[in-house]
């Protein structure tokens, strides 16, 4: 067994796909596996004894953080998307993980590298693709929305040219005004809500009650609205009308999705320490709107919050886009999760 271990461990070490090096406190390489030799473009023998800095002609590794967190505090440190250029001028993007280890009474840094160039390129390509699709959907939707009233306006103007009867002329003029108003309204909605917020302390459950009342007006499938409130939630400083609009937009979507019946649950909770990318909210009110309908169509998922993303006849695809703008104006966050039989939208508003 012992012998097996002795032979097995170096073999495993050198067969790892991850590049691993062992550094001392001065960032001198003491040990390296085959993967790291390939990554750095240096034979293992040349790598050992080198300073880590000397293996790059340029790098963005945050050495201060490694000194502080790893060596001093003993806390693991991860660095993502670190750009480096090796001494043979090859560029790479790496993820790095550093950990303090004690071996034979000496402190070392065990550093793992994973090359992510392909992932980065794939992400960029896929982002571009999504943006392209979103832009195309937007333009198609816009063209459709603009062409309809334009057709009406043109027809009315033509009639106006030859129409002698005053009442018919009045009708044409009315139609033109109606259709231009429709266009103005479209442009206004596209530009998004631009009024300033009127914030005041507000009881969120009263807001939700108003939404429930309003949504009973177009509840044609008798959908049950279930309340799951946390009664201990204090008043929160928000623009009540705007938050009501957001929740109403989302509840309406759920009502429209539940064509076979079902239920919608409105939940409120307090959440602590939420992080989304760069954004951190220490304490937030969560409003969760959940339905047990068919789920969001897969082809809409990537651009769900974009304007004109819709699969409804006569839908303008602006409901969620407006909701997102309003929540961002409140410095909050909105996200969703959906699969067959379940859709939930989560709104987080900072206290
Ligand atoms: N709860 C849900 N279940 C299933 N699909 C949903 C749900 N909520 C939203 N969607 C999908 O997301 C799309 C975008 O919603 P959004 O509210 O932005 O636009 P819309 O409802 O299509 O049009 P508008 O709200 O402007 O009248 C909808 O067309 C629908 O396909
Ligand atoms: Mg909608």
Image: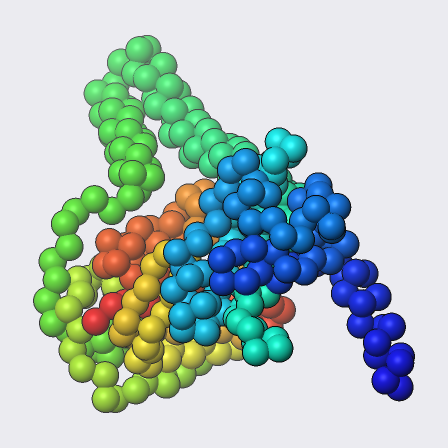
Q: Position of residue 90 (x, y in %)?
A: 64, 34
Q: Nearer the viewer, residue 341 or 93?
A: 93
Q: Quadrant of residue 96?
A: bottom right
- 298 sits left or right of 2 in the view: left
**Quarter in which the N terminus is drawn:** bottom right
Seen at 67% across and 60% down, the residue is 31
183 relative to 114, above or below: above
- Determine the residue positioned at 44% across, 54% down: 63
As displayed, is residue 224 above or below residue 325?
below
Answer whether residue 300 is visible to the viewer in this image: no
Q: Is residue 253 above or below residue 351?
A: above
Q: Is residue 263 above or below residue 246?
A: below
Instruction: Find residue 310 and report its horizontal and vertical position in percent.
Output: 50, 48
Where on the picture, by quarter, is residue 297? bottom right
The reply, left or right, for residue 313 in relation to residue 229 is right
| x 34%, y 59%: residue | 279
Residue at (56% x, 50% y) in the render: 52
């Amino acid at each position: 067994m012992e012998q097996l271990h002795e032979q097995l461990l170096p073999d495993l070490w050198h067969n790892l796909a991850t590049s691993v090096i062992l550094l001392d406190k001065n960032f001198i390489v003491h040990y390296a596996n085959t993967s790291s030799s390939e990554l750095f473009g240096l034979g293992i023998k040349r790598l050992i004894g080198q300073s880590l800095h000397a293996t790059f002609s340029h790098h963005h590794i945050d050495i201060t953080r490694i000194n502080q967190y790893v060596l001093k505090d003993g806390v693991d440190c991860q660095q993502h998307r670190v750009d480096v250029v090796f001494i043979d001028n090859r560029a790479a993007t790496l993820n790095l993980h550093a950990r303090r280890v004690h071996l034979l009474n000496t402190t070392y840094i065990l550093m793992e590298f994973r090359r992510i160039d392909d992932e980065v390129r794939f992400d960029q390509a896929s982002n571009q693709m999504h943006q392209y699709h979103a832009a195309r959907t937007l333009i198609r939707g816009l063209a459709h929305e603009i062409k309809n009233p334009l057709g009406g306006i043109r027809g009315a103007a033509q009639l106006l040219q030859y129409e002698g009867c005053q009442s018919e002329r009045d009708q044409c003029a009315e139609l033109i005004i109606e259709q231009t108003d429709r266009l103005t309204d479209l442009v206004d909605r596209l530009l998004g809500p631009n009024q300033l917020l009127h914030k005041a302390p507000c009881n969120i459950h009263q807001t939700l009650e108003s939404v429930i009342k309003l949504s009973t007006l177009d509840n044609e499938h008798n959908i049950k609205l279930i309340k799951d409130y946390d009664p201990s939630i204090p008043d929160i400083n928000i623009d009540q009308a705007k938050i009501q609009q957001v929740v109403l937009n989302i509840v309406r979507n759920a009502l429209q999705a539940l064509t076979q019946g079902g239920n919608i649950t409105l939940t409120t909770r307090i959440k602590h320490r939420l992080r989304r990318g760069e954004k951190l909210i220490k304490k937030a009110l969560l409003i969760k709107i959940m339905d047990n309908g068919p789920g969001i169509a897969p082809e809409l998922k990537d651009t769900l919050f974009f304007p004109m993303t819709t699969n409804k006849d006569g839908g303008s695809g602006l409901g969620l886009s407006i909701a997102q703008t309003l929540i961002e104006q409140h410095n909050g966050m909105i996200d969703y999760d959906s699969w067959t039989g379940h859709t939930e939208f989560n709104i987080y508003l900072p206290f």
